[in-house]
Amino acid sequence: MEKSVFEISQMDCPSEENLIRLRLDEIAEIKHLAFDIPQRRLTVHHEGRLEAIERSIADLNLGGARVSTERSEETRFEEPAKQRKLLWTVLAINFGFFAIEMTTGLISGSMGLVADSLDMLADAFVYGISLFAVGATLSRKRRIATLAGYFQLALAIVGFVEVVRRFLGVEEMPDSGTMIVVSILALVANGFCLYLLQKSKSNEAHMQASAIFTSNDVIINLGVIAAGVLVYLFGSNRPDLIVGTIVFVVVLRGALRILRLGKRSDG
């Protein structure tokens, strides 16, 4: 067996991890994948087909590059059931905070919270793809990915339309206090999810607090918190709309990435 290490420069959060898992699932020679999100590293244990693995990673446009390949005698890996349990946990957390942020965002009038809720939903989509398609054929997995991508794309477009309406219409002030409190809770949730995922990849509890800030989700949470503070200080909805627009772009990119993955032909 061989062990190949890849550096994935744009692997910033667990959603990219699951996209990579879905993409590499078609290569039967892969025996195990080990992700290190803080270091943006992927270790692949495989029996041949290195070129196919490299090509699949490159096709995702995440800045993947092979660092090394060497022989490996390792044959015992983490049980899939344990990973599924963890995926269910982070799926529940992401979907739960999607509901919380969407509800509070609509009530408080904050586009930043609404956009962040869609980012949480996007992560939940990807975890769901990994879970609900377990044991399914590759074509079925891609159909599921395509449906999730289109739904996420539709939500992002609706969000953009609402942002434009608010920019051009009468100024609607969001509740800055709700923005700040809910985003802080989402920040804690994202950090906890990343901790669980990182801890599951190693027998050592080596997850450090600084690693949390490599996640785009955490950066988005901080952006919404900052927007809430600026809304309070300046009495303007512009910071909320600007952050909302940025997050909708992130959600849109994620949707397009899922669609590209889902539409790839078998081969």
Image: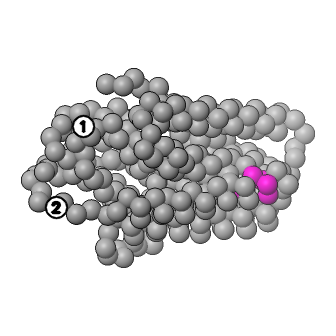
Instruction: State the colouring used for the structure image.
Output: one colour
Left or right: residue 119 versus residue 103 is: left
Density class for disc 1 (Cα within 10 Å; few <14, some 14-19, many ≥20) is some
Q: Position of residue 222 (x, y in %)?
A: 60, 60
The residue under the point 41% across, 65% down is 82
Q: Earlier in the sequence, mark 2 or mark 1?
A: 1
Q: Which amino acid does label 2 sit on?
A: Glu
Measured Cα–Cα span from mark 2 to mark 1? 21 Å
**Dots 2 and 1: beta carbons under 8 Å?**
no
Residue at the far bottom: name it: 205
The residue under the point 30% across, 53% down is 33
Q: Name which quarter of the figure residue 227 lies in.
A: bottom right
Callout 1 secondary element: helix
Residue holding disc 1: 54
Q: In which quadrant of the rendered image does the C terminus lie? A: top left
The residue under the point 11% across, 60% down is 73
The residue under the point 67% across, 59% down is 96
Residue at the far right: name it: 170
Q: Label the magenta part by its dominant secondary structure.
A: helix
Density class for disc 2 (Cα within 10 Å; few <14, some 14-19, many ≥20) is few
Q: Which range of residues does the magenta coloring cover?
A: 101-105
Q: Residue 74 carries which label?
A: 2
Q: Where is residue 25 in the image (x, y as percent from the top left)?
A: 35, 41
Instruction: Indicate whether residue 202 is drawn in magenta.
Output: no
Q: What residue type is labelled 1?
A: Glu
Callout 2 secondary element: loop
Q: Which mark is residue 130?
A: none
